[in-house]
Amino acid sequence: MADWKQISGGLTTISVGSRTHVWGVNSSGQIYRYTGHDANPWIGIPGRAVDIGVAADGTVWHVNSAGGIFRYTGDQGSTDWVGVTGGLTRISVGSRTHVWGVNSLGQIYRYTGHDANPWIGIPGRAVDIGVAADGTVWHVNSAGGIFRYTGDQGSTDWVPVSGGLSRISVGSRTNVWGVNSSDQIYRYTGHDANPWTGIPGGAVDVGAAADGTVWVVNSAGGIYRYTGDQPS
């Protein structure tokens, strides 16, 4: 993949908060954090997960195979992860206060910022969701439909955007990437009338950050960082 630089290791899901904040999970549920050094790229973090979300401010949440929800505190004390009540299968983190997730029924939830009563339900159904620090939220549903959140802007909670995706990641209002069921990679153009441009390569998951950093993992577990905007 000429537009991508392969990074050693094997992951099944990846999340990117910034150039330096990249976390992933492998097929055994093991959690890894990018070291910032391609020659020795990953450090293992205790815990088991099926999905993970990381933000530019360093906030990290994961969900495990039982639906358990955890927030990373390994940089704050003796406990690596603090459990938060609820049950989710997918999670996305834009910042400390912007955390959204989806449960096994496709129901959508937003973090309240208060662990004692952590989740508020949002109308809609999704299989994956992406949230950015600027408040931008997109989701995709089980039919591949793509939606952008407008529940804070008017009477409609979600506005459909043409196309079909199975995974989505949102770094900012303008940096939105997705993968479809055929592993094709797409980037949002910023124009709803012609919303997607294809990017060479194949992936099963993608992570996009506000600073433009993008990583993907493919069906074989291969890990790649986007270099298509850099001189070859």
Image (tube, rainbow, N blue to C red):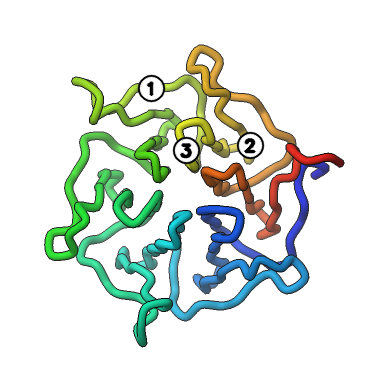
Mark 1 to mark 3: distance in Å?
18 Å
What is the count of numbered marks? 3
Residue at 40%, 62% in the rendered image: 59
Location of residue 36 (image quadrant): bottom right
User: What percent of the width, then of the height, locates residue 189?
Assistant: 57, 23
Question: Is residue 109 found left or right of 92 in the rendered image?
Answer: left
User: What percent of the width, then of the height, locates residue 18?
Assistant: 55, 53
Kindly identify which residue carries mark 2. Answer: 185
Mark 3 to mark 2: distance in Å?
18 Å
| Residue 101 seen in the current view | no
Location of residue 85 (image quadrant): bottom left
Kindly identify which residue carries mark 1. Answer: 160
User: What percent of the width, then of the height, locates residue 142?
Assistant: 40, 37
Q: Quadrant of the N terminus?
A: top right
What numbered label is drawn on residue 172? Answer: 3
Of mark 2 and mark 1, the one earlier in the sequence is: 1
Of mark 3 and mark 2, the one earlier in the sequence is: 3
**Numbered disc in front, either 3 or 2:** 3
Mark 2 to mark 1: distance in Å?
19 Å
Residue 28 vertical placement versus 196 (above, below): below
Residue at 57%, 45% in the rendered image: 211
Q: Amino acid at mark 2?
A: Ile
Q: Amino acid at mark 3?
A: Ser
| Residue 160 seen in the current view | yes
User: What percent of the width, then of the height, locates residue 17?
Assistant: 51, 53
Frontmost residue, 83 versus 146: 83
